[in-house]
Amino acid sequence: MFRIATRMLRFRKGGFTASFIALFFGAAIVLACGGLMETGIRSAVPPERFAAAPIVISGNQEIDLPEEPVAPDEDDGKNRDSGVLSERVRLDAGLITQIEKLQGVERALPDVTFDVHENGRQLPGHGWSSAELAGDSLVAGAAPTRAGQVALPGHQPGETVELAVRGKVERFTVTGTTASPSVFFTDGEANRLLGKAGAVDAIAVLTAPGTDVEALRERVDKAISGSPAISLTGDERGLAEFFGAAEGGTGLITLAGVFGGMATTVAIFVVASTLGLSVQQRGRELALLRAIGTTPGQLRRMVLGETMVVGVLATLLAYFPGQWLGEFLFDQLAGRGVVAEQMSYHQGWIPMVSATGAALLTAFGAAFVAGGRAARARPAEALAEAAVQRRWLSAPRLIIALLCLGGGTALVIITFTVMTGPVAASTAGPTVMLWAIALALLGPGIARLAIATLRWPLRAVTGLSGRLALLNARNRRVGMAAAITPIMLASGMALSMIYLQTTQGAAGERAFSENLRADTVLASSTGGFDPSLVGTVAELPGVAGASALVTSSGFITDYDDGWQDDQGLPLQGITAEGAGRTTATPFTAGSVEELRGETAALPVSLAESLGKGIGDTVTLRFGDGAQTDVRIAGLLGGRPGYEIALVPASLLVPHTDAGTVPQILVKAEPGADLGPALAGLAERVPGLVVADRATVTAANAEQQDIGAWVNYLLVAMIVGYTVISLVNTLVLATAERRREFALQRLVGSTRGQVLRMTAVEAVLVAVAGIVLGGFVSLTTLVPFSLVISDTPMPAGPIGVLLAVVGGAAGLVLLATLVPAWFALRARPVEAAVAP
């Protein structure tokens, strides 16, 4: 039967080409998502400055959170959740002495990194002792040896330069010109400019000749146990230079998992639909084989053999396109700052095996089901069924459809009753797919309902062509359902995913603008402001209030009941004296004026989950890993899903990487013009930039657009694949009707009449598919919009709907009429007897 299967490929090029296309593109997309996931898991960041150090010690950016309240003396480390710290965790410089005493260590070099601003350019600053790590050399001059000296590119020895570090401008004498784009100070000067007394960012361990690196790493791990430090080797060392890459890797895993799962589901759906249609169109051929004595087992093996030949060829050829697509997606994500540019893309054998296995397993399952149905039918019944297929509903099909309907309904209820804020979007993909699968399984019944609903309008508008089209559609409703399904899937996914993003973006912008009362925002082009500048701004004439705005994240470490995700609790540092005038965060208890010293205002939902109230104390772990007991001075309301915690800016600033105030919010007195006063301040404060409310709101919207763009890119990939399957299915379905078209012409129909009939059928298919796709999208959009915006209407331009509807309708007409026109080019007599 395998020999027969391979020979069949020569005579059924259309069906097998359609199956090949579905498997090829499906495997390529799944392979690309697998490569992104492997890249995120590896988080390989090849070292640059630390390339010469076999071992690098860095701060541990991951923390453990107890999942239930425990006393400190009873904490055994079990039942813990994990979180990722947002600021760099720095090390105690005292570790250097301990490391240098270990056997096999030649030298242990400290490294610190901070931003240096000079004439509009930003450069990394370091201590000179770490220059040898990356082989940094001087083009001219000598290394800095005392305070006030610096070596940097673009200047000659002896020049005096003004450099801004942590919002302060200082003068330095250039002692040397470096080849690399880095600024080097003495070690003592670098530690002072870092602003973290007795701390270093990393320790590079240089080994003595002949040292076993892995054995030394074990000794290093013992030496640093008990401190918030980890040892890194190989490509892990790059994480010490670019600590944010680890967080980007975690996000990449989530992103690839979500869209990879969706792509796999769509691929299974598309491949099964295409293979089913291909086998269905060969019903007469398979029935004749049964009639001449072919056993059901032989028939089933033949269909499986044909499918596996096409499947193996398609998945093998998909390897290189899948790799190119994965690299392209990764480059786009890195270019937008979603992942670190320094991260290396990896796509090994595991994604290849997974994608191949998923594609072949899908093909095998679809062929087994389709071939099994053809094999079980009696020869005489199969011949009759092949002419016009009517039976379609089986017990397994009905059970699966009902289960999907139940699951989709359950997700709708969960979204509406349990989810809050942006996290409600997490149920969107599964909801769309469950409803789409259910409606696809019930497709022939839905097609019959659609035909009955559109019967009179089509007949009234299209006349005889419409009558012929309706008669054809009624007799071919099973085949029509196969054409409606990809339209429903493509339009439903496009509408739901795009409007989900626009609705979420609009809600985020609304939450931001509602919380902002300031008329003016002061920003810095030199790394931020000294916290004392807030008081200076508040005293300017015409200023009603001024407040610092410092953003970070942290964790309430008393215990984690699931309220905090792995990114922690968003923190905002404000100035109590002016925050009431510049922000509008709603307090349900306490007030912003009480946020002084070691205090915090927590979201009321978090406080309730902790069992805490006003005056109680909780332990707050900042983004750099430091812990402080803070008193709850207020409880905050606000939009669910957009909760933040407020702390005094003076408490939060020392625990941020910059150690400065990035923005100052300013509220003017009624009728006051702050322009002259702020212009005078800008002359005294280097790098001060004055922005109005509209500029700040636009900047926030632009930041949100980055996340939206990523979703649009990946959704476009999946919808594009669905569109390919749509065209694939329609071309296959129409091209296989050449004998039917020929018979119509032999009984008197003209070519134009046949084309008009086909156009009416295409309109019927398009309308049914688009309406069903719209319904599928509403099952996600309505509950999500109610949760995030308190309205059932999603936010977004009407042009999206028009584009999706117009694009789907245009594709259906094009993919139907073009192959029909080619099929009608042959002479009717020849086409009627063609195989």
Image (spheres, grey):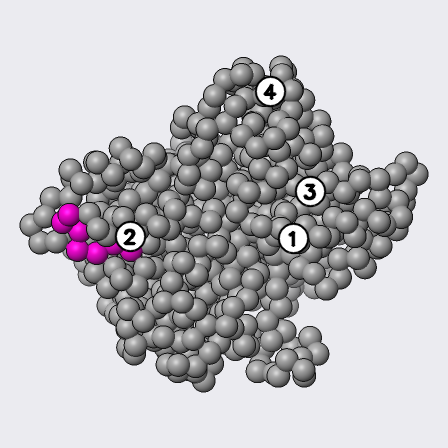
- Which is in the foreground here, disc 1 or disc 2? 2
Q: Please provide percent x and percent y for residue 712.
A: 41, 47
Please, what is the dominant secondary structure of the magenta stretch? strand
Residue drawn at x 67%, y 22% is 137
Task: Indicate whether 372 appears above or below 192.
Answer: below
Disc 2 element: helix
* Residue named by callout 3: 110
Q: Earlier in the sequence, mark 4 or mark 3?
A: 3
Q: Mark 1 vs mark 4: which is more N-terminal? A: 1
Q: Is residue 542 magenta?
A: yes
Residue 176, which numbered label? Answer: 4
**Residue at image coords 37%, 51%:** 531
Residue labelled with disc 1: 91
Q: Which residues are drawn in magenta?
A: 541-547
- Callout 1: helix, strand or loop? strand
Alpha-carbon span between mark 1 and mark 2: 33 Å
Q: Marks 1/4: CA distance?
A: 29 Å
